[in-house]
Amino acid sequence: MNDLGLIIGITLMYAAPLMYTALGGVISENSGVVNIGLEGMMTMGAFIGATVCYYSHSPWLAFIAAGLSAGVLALLHAIASVTFGADQIISGTAINFLGPGLALFLSRIFFNGATMTLTIKLEDKMPRPLNGIFSPGSFMDLVFNQYATVYMAFILVFVLWFILYKTRLGLRIRAVGEHPRAADTLGVDVFKIRYISVILSGIFAGFGGAAMSIAVVSNFRATLISGQGFIALAAMIFGKWKPQGSMWACLLFGMAQGLVVYLGGTKLQISSQLLAMIPYVLTIIVLMGFVGKSSGPAADGVPYEKNQG
Amino acid sequence: MKKNRFKYTAISILIGLIVGAIILGVSGFNPFEAYWIMITGVFGSSKYISWTIIRSTSVIITGISVAFAFRTGLFNIGAEGQFIIGAMAATLVGYFWHLPPIVHVIVAFSAACIAAAIWGGIAGAIKSKFGINEVITSIMLNWIALYLNNYVIFWDKFKRPNSEASYKILESAQSSILTNWKLTEAGRTWISNHPLIGGFIDPPINIGFIVAILLAFLINYILNNTTLGYQLRAVGFNKDASEYGGINVKRNIVVAMMISGAISGAAGALHVLGVSNEISVLAAMEGNGFNGMAVSLIAGNNPIGCIFAGLLFGGLTYGGHKLQPIMGAPSEVINIMIGTIVFFIAMPKFVQMIVDRKGNFKIVKRGEKVESDK
């Protein structure tokens, strides 16, 4: 029972950073802008989060700073892909070089030539709001004694779902992603909506990075994010471009991580390599067998030009 | 159009260098000194030039792989995994099989291409059969490849004791040139007596770069001069029209991904056979495939252009690595520069705006297509 609790606990912890980032992908792509730059934005957020947290001793300030720094990177992506009609894949690839490049460059400057930040003190890390409520080591404690970022990730899933499907702004975002010309005709400012969505996607990805560097671990290093932004991107596609779908996909990846960590602590040393493959194999199988053709918003990836045809 | 593309690329590279200089300057490093270190770090001796070429080979080839996929309308983000599979297959064949020299190289190389073609083909087959975006399958396959690589290395008969790597491949499978001669007394003397040529051949020179150039021309030929290439490009250009025109779109997707995979696999194989001679445990993605994306984009998805873009990429990274030890400036400034270059390549409209004063800003801002852009 406690083993199960441990696995669920680790699952939630590892799923949270992916969830923020995947939600970033959801909002950007629903507005019609492909964002493969999530990886770079997440890396930036992870670095700024760890650095601000180390120097300011405030995880909340760090969390916000992480979001803002990645938001700035996203602004670049928005300028290129919205205003200048750039190829969004190319622009996103550029962000994936810029984000880690800047993060490691700054890390070497702030931390004496090292590509990893100094360790954040335990009391400066993201707090655990339910710490001490359950008896230590019990099932409830293992499952629910999580960092605040974990709870906020689930809240954000709900908030984004509500915005996208229950508000005017959400309707506009989806309209712009499905049929920008029609939206434009109806008086929706396509450029403005896309700018908002892309910048928000960066902010979310930055949160995702910080959820990794100031909660799951307590510093930033060169390999911390390596590929998680891409996993989040895959989770978003897996989740059919929907907040709740992405959440489940992220939980699946988180669970795989949880299993690997859990079984890594047992005697099954070598086969942990094979075990680590499971979520990726499973994703492919699930997509083939159950999900069927997944299609994103109709205008996803298509630059919008106002005076065209 | 072609002339403009070249112009925009050149200007994007220039902007990248300027941004790099500004960032270095703001951080308190002398940009002129930094660029001088990089230039001498690449061209300063024949040895450095040789190393730059060796380092560039992998990204040139993965660049060709990504470019090929792009031209057929596919986004091969899986070059990374295909590279890993190719390297792994080449090492397995290079270590476990006993074959005569040259034959062994060819067999190991072919095995790598076939394995990686299958790996790439999986993503293509799933796309054509189930309509699942190749991006997501490729990302999954990258990770599966990484863990498969780590799993294989831990095989008892394959793992070199007290290391995180496999055994070295047999000598008969190594594609480096003059390796044994370089170790002899006569070889060492000759190299030190002929600094120019000797310096050039002192690093692990191998057949990789030559194969890369041949591949670039081969792929360029396939794309532009064959029926297969025509069909593949047609599908990339307009899927529905191609279907209507009698092209088997589904088969084409699989074929395109297989070819793209085989090319990335070739990059992995050449790296193992010519440079590393082993595979080691991977903690994270090494970036061979992702760097190939940048190379392909800088080259405008032109296979021949990938040779030059790859050399630029290789030169920047090889020269850039000397910034840290010599002047203490973070070598990551190179990634910022490459990112900037790719960023500006993504928006020719903006570049046009700076170059061509006649390119009225208002017009561009309204989102109209500027005439000379096309």
Image (spheres, grey):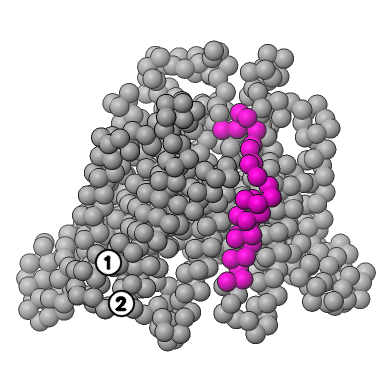
Q: Which residues are magenta?
A: A274-301
Front-most of A258 and B329? Answer: A258
Residue B354 lies in the magenta-colored region: no
Q: Earlier in the sequence, mark 2 or mark 1?
A: 2
Q: Chain of mark 1?
A: B
Q: Which residue is mark 1?
A: B107
Front-most of B31 and A145? Answer: A145
Residue B127 pos. (x, y %): 53, 45
Dot 1 amino acid type: Val
Q: Around disc 1, counting alpha carbons within 10 Å, would you say few (fewer than 14), some (14 to 19), or many (20 or more)?
A: some
Q: Chain of mark 2?
A: B
Residue A249 is tagged as none
Q: Which residue is mark 2?
A: B97
Locate the C terminus of chain B and report the quarter of the image it occupies: top left
**Numbered marks: total:** 2
Residue A297 lies in the magenta-colored region: yes
Q: Is residue B131 above or below residue A216?
A: above
The picture quadrant where one finds residue B306 is top left
Locate the N terminus of chain B and report the quarter of the image it occupies: top left
The picture quadrant where one finds residue A253 is bottom right
Could you tell me if residue B12 is visible in this image? Answer: no
